[in-house]
Image: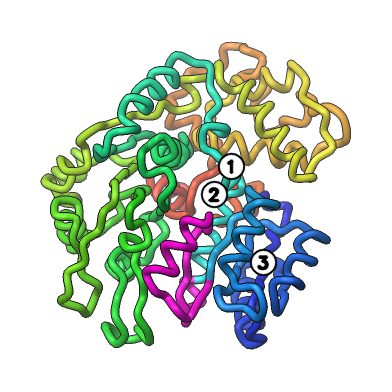
Amino acid sequence: MSPTLKAHVLIIDDEEAMRDSCQRILDKIEIRVSAAPDGAAGLRLLEREPCDLLLLDLILPGENGLALLRQIRQNHPHLPVIIVSAYGTVKSAVEAMKAGAYDFLTKPFSPKELRRLVRQALEEVRSIPAAGRARDRIIYQSQAMASVMDMVHRVAQTDSTVLLTGESGTGKGQIARYIHELSLRAEQPFISVDCGTLVETLFESELFGHIKGAFTGASGDKVGKFEMAQGGTIFFDEISNINLEVQAKLLRAVEEREISRVGSHQTIHVDVRILAATNQDLRQAIEQGRFREDLFYRLNVVSIHLPPLRDRREDIPLLIDFFINMSRERGRTQALGISAAAVKRLEAHTWPGNVRELANAIERLAVLGSEGTIEAEDVSFIEPGAADGQPGPALSLDSVEREHILKVLERFQGSRTEAAQALGIDRKTLREKIRRYGLND
């Protein structure tokens, strides 16, 4: 959510200890929590006060979690729902994903695992709703994006593996969802794996699952992402973050469509389409010994590059209108529109965080601005000279990005979490940029 707004999570679980535990865990990352012991009470809370994310137990008194999920999907199509269950079977996980769940979390889980998944879901919903059709969220009129979409339509109904490249925030995840929606697998699960937020030691378990006792803390069986995606699509976002050991096992899964859970020698066949994305130069990573060349060629069957927002500026007015309307629909703004001068300022900005940064900026403007129209003076983070089209000093893109990151860090008193949210990038990417630009001091 915007740094000025506290995210609101609703928990529906019949175990009081579980509700209390989740609340304590999420309190530590400043997330407001409401809780209900059953579906009926949860629906009443949801109608009284909308939330940003729902944690839903699979086994509830009366109506079960899957039936409740289907009902919620009809009335609240853009609400991300994480199913939580002590019974992490492949069947229940796949059914939950088919019914529109954002993800499936098996009890017991660690505080770190819950916080990571909640942050990931909120990050996605902050700029673009997690549910609904991706085609309604891909906004463009530029030739650069038209070329991308032409390639997307040509490859979508094949079963080819696709590698999406481009800077952070360019919309690689939305394009991946759109490819799935156009494919013959559209009615099956779409499973997204954010490789940039996973703890390295949990990569293998997250992808392939594990059996009880496989390692310290494995108190029960866990269904991995590959099994959850059975029959559908699995999308690896920022795949360059996977370590070499797991890359070798991923290569086997890509080549043979077979996996084994951690701690088990049993082979499981998986029927999935594989999409991947990266903001890194994988060929350079291969030269540096950080990425397997054979895996790269398996993933790079079809390559689609997404242009940065600075190279598709004619799309900015359309995106601004889209994000203002989205904020209005969520009841977070009464702004009626935006002035031409304000749009001009926004068009002139370099947007190092791309579309995600623009979405966050519009949300802040819509929430913090006065009623009526967003004016040019409200866009205080844009340098007046550049916004007015005046030829300022010759600055490289790196110089502009460095200054922008520095200003955002100063605005949030050095808080990297809030700065990353405002920039529309994850903390790992921000940490790398801080090191690159020498901003540690």
Three-letter amino acid code at disc 1? Ile
Query: What whole-number distance in Å separates the C-alpha atoms at marks 1 and 3?
Result: 21 Å
Residue for point 65% across, 73% down: 63
Query: What whole-number distance in Å separates the C-alpha atoms at marks 1 and 2?
Result: 6 Å
Three-letter amino acid code at disc 3? Glu
**CB under 8 Å between callouts 1 and 2?**
yes
Which of labels 3 and 2 is toward the front? 2
Between residue 288 and residue 115, name the one nearer to us.
115
Q: Which mark is residue 124?
A: 2
- Residue 229 in view in this figure: yes
Measured along the vertical axis of the image, is residue 392 above or below residue 64?
above
Between residue 26 and residue 365, name the one nearer to us.
26
Disc 3, SS? loop
Disc 1, SS? loop
Q: Which mark is residue 128?
A: 1
Measured along the vertical axis of the image, is residue 245 above or below residue 187?
below
User: Which range of residues does the magenta coloring cover?
Assistant: 84-113
